[in-house]
Image: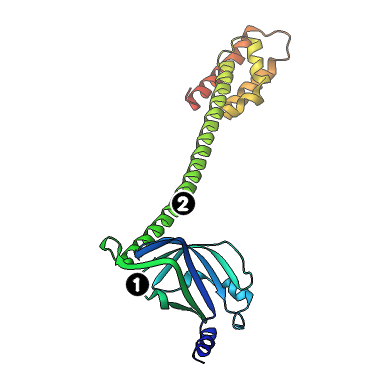
Amino acid sequence: MKYFLLLFFSTFLFSAELFLSRELGTTVKLGETIEVNWILKYQPGVELFNESEVLKFDIKELGDKLHFSNINRDSEMLNGEVAGVLSITPLEVFDPDNFSIKSDNLYIKLNFSNIKFDFTPVDGLSAFTIIQDANVQNRNSFYFYVFLIYILIFALIGFRYFYQKIQYIKELKSKKSAYLEKQNYFYNLISSAKDRVSIERIYLERASWQPFFNVNSELLESFFDELNKHQFKMKWTEREFTSVKSKLIKLQDSIRQNNGI
C-alpha cells in the first residue's frame, strides 16, 4: 500500500524526468561547468501536455540552483522522450538525490548518473560571480560584434562617398582641362589672325568659340558688320583691310580684358 501511494503521487507530482549523465564518473564543484548527456522523459498518461507544448518547452528556463547552457537537442520527440547534450553549472547547494524543478505548470524531477557535486566554490569564488562574469563576457562579446558591424557599415558608406567624391573631382578637373584647352585654341585663333583668310575663319567658327569667352556684344557686332561689307569681294583694298583689322583689334583687346587672358 505504501509503495502504491508513492507511485500514485509521483505519477501526478512529476510530469517529466530529466536524466543527466556522464560516461565516466565526474565530480563538479560549485560554479564549475561540465558537459553532460540529457534525456527528458514525459510520464505516460499525463494529459496536461500534448506534443506541441512539449516541443515548445525551453529547458534553459529550468531552475535557479542549477544553470543550463549550450543546449543541443540530438533527437526530436519520440515516445515521450527527447535527448541531447548540454552544460550544467551548480549555483547553489541542493540535494542531488531529491531535486526537482517547476517550470510553469511542468514539474520535472532530475536524476544524476556518474555525476557527484562538491559545493565548494571554484578557487574561492562564488558561483554567482562566475556566472555573472560569464554573462558579462558574453554580453560584451555581443556588443563588440554589433559595434564592429556598425563600424564596417559606416566604413563602407564612407569609402563609397569619398570614392564618388574623388571620381567627381577627377571628372571636373578633366572637363576643366578640356575646356581650357579649347579656350586656348580659340583664343590663339582670334589673337593670331593677321590676314584675310585667318580673319574670315574667325567669322566661320563664331558658333564654336563664342561660348568660351565673355564678349562685348557691341564690339562683336561691329566687327561682323564691317567684315560682312567686304568678305564677299574678290579682293580687299588696303583701306578695307585696315578697317576690318581695326575692328578686330578692338574685339581682341576686349576678349583679353574680359577673360583675364
Identify which residue, 80 or 97, lies in the foreground. 97
* Residue that lies at the very extreme toward the left in this rendered image: 124
The label on residue 138 is none
Q: Amino acid at mark 1?
A: Glu
Is residue 240 at all visible to an observer of this figure? no
- Residue depicted at x 36% and y 75%: 94
| Quarter residue 192 falls in | top right
* Distance from the alpha carbon under mark 1 to that under mark 2: 40 Å
Percent from the top left, x then y, of residue 206?
A: 65, 23
In this view, the residue in front, 117 or 193, is 117
Residue shown at 53% from the left, 34% from the top: 167
- Would residue 183 be seen by someone viewing this image from the given angle? yes
Residue type at numbered disc 2? Tyr
In front: 249, or 138? Answer: 138
Question: x, y (%) of residue 142?
Answer: 43, 56
Residue 15 vertical placement versus 236 (above, below): below
- 221 is higher (above) or lower (below) than 110: above
Position in image of residue 71 (x %, y %): 50, 63
Q: Nearer the viewer, mark 1 or mark 2?
A: 1
Read off the residue under disc 1: 92
Percent x, y of residue 163: 51, 37
- Residue at mark 2: 150
